[in-house]
Image (cartoon, helix red, strand yellow):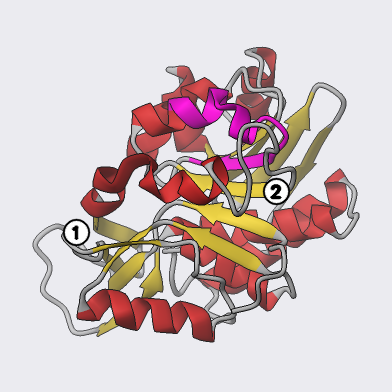
Amino acid sequence: MSAARPDILCIGSVLWDVIGRTASHMAPGSDLPGRIARVPGGVALNIAATLARLGLRPALLSAVGRDPEGDALIAECAALGLETQHVYRSDDLPTDRYMAIEGANGLVAAIADAHSLEAAGDKILRPLLAGPLGRAEAPWSGMVALDGNLTQALLERIATDPAFAAADLRVAPASPGKAERLLPFLSHGGAALYLNRSEAEILDGRAFASAEEAALRLVARGARRVVVTDGARPACAASAEAVVVASPPAVMVTRVTGAGDAFMAAHIAAERAGADDAAALDRALGAAALHVAGETPL
């Protein structure tokens, strides 16, 4: 891959997604016909892949095993136009996996096996801590998309480490179960949080009637910027300076895994291209709608 400076760093999970989908409604214990696919996945990878399709040059920082699954995954990433030379390759940790089952009623169940990423710890940050991407005295000054599959301790370090002091951080929890890991970024002056309403509720410890209510509450708690989605209901992008609310396009839902990643990547790309708050939110909602309708690559 090229040694030129990447447009954005995507830090977090890079793994294999194993997704089973059926067109029928699924209840617990259902046994139905459908399709099972293995595709490159993980929040960081999904965001990077969408950014690459939008013309940017993303670089991945993650952990991938030196096993056949890892070699195949790295090859797939390169084919997608993603820079992988900064990925930590472990000799003793297996490549991570994610498994999900989706029905006509949405996501039925999922299990994320990201133990290798967690075990790798700060090894994945070496290119930022001691070059070639940055170091404390010359920190990375560009965009960073960060996902909550990292450990709580590592996320807390990133929130305070001088190596990230000049970065434009865009942070997502990866799943509602990991939303609380983002607490260190609520008071971070350079971070924007991307959440769905359920994740915002977990982060704040209360229920919200809307995405707008959730976003405004988190801004009031000190967050610099917050973007909250709420499925087919209106989404909100809020900061101390502006509040924008928009409704997503109505589409037939054929898949849900990765929709939030497509939203976040499209929002980042729109803002990088100079779009204002309203235009960036509209583009992000449009990208997520195309994704759940099955009109973009897996």
**Residue type at mark 2?**
Met
Under circle 2, the secondary element is strand
**Residue type at mark 1?**
Leu
Depth check, front residue: 291 or 16: 16
For the residues bearing labels 1 and 2, Cβ distance under 8 angstroms: no
Magenta stretch in the rendered image: 156-172
**Residue 250 numbered tag:** none
User: Circle 2: is it few (<14), some (14-19), or many (20+) Cα within 10 Å?
Assistant: some
| 80 sits to left or right of 16 | right
User: Circle 1: is it few (<14), some (14-19), or many (20+) Cα within 10 Å?
Assistant: some
Which residue is located at x 67 percent, y 32 percent? Answer: 137
| 240 sits to left or right of 40 | right
Depth check, front residue: 35 or 271: 271
**Residue 143 numbered tag:** 2
- The residue furthest top is 221
Which residue is located at x 78 percent, y 56 percent? Answer: 282
Depth check, front residue: 210 or 143: 143
Residue 4 spot, x, y in % from top left: 72, 69
Residue 146 spot, x, y in % from top left: 53, 45
Reply yes or no: does residue 45 show up in magenta.
Answer: no
Q: Which residue has dot 1 on it?
A: 93
Is residue 248 visible in the rendered image? The answer is: yes
Residue 131 spot, x, y in % from top left: 58, 49
The picture quadrant where one finds residue 92 is bottom left
Under circle 1, the secondary element is loop
Reply yes or no: does residue 157 show up in magenta.
Answer: yes
| 251 sits to left or right of 255 | right
Q: Is residue 12 above or below residue 36?
A: above
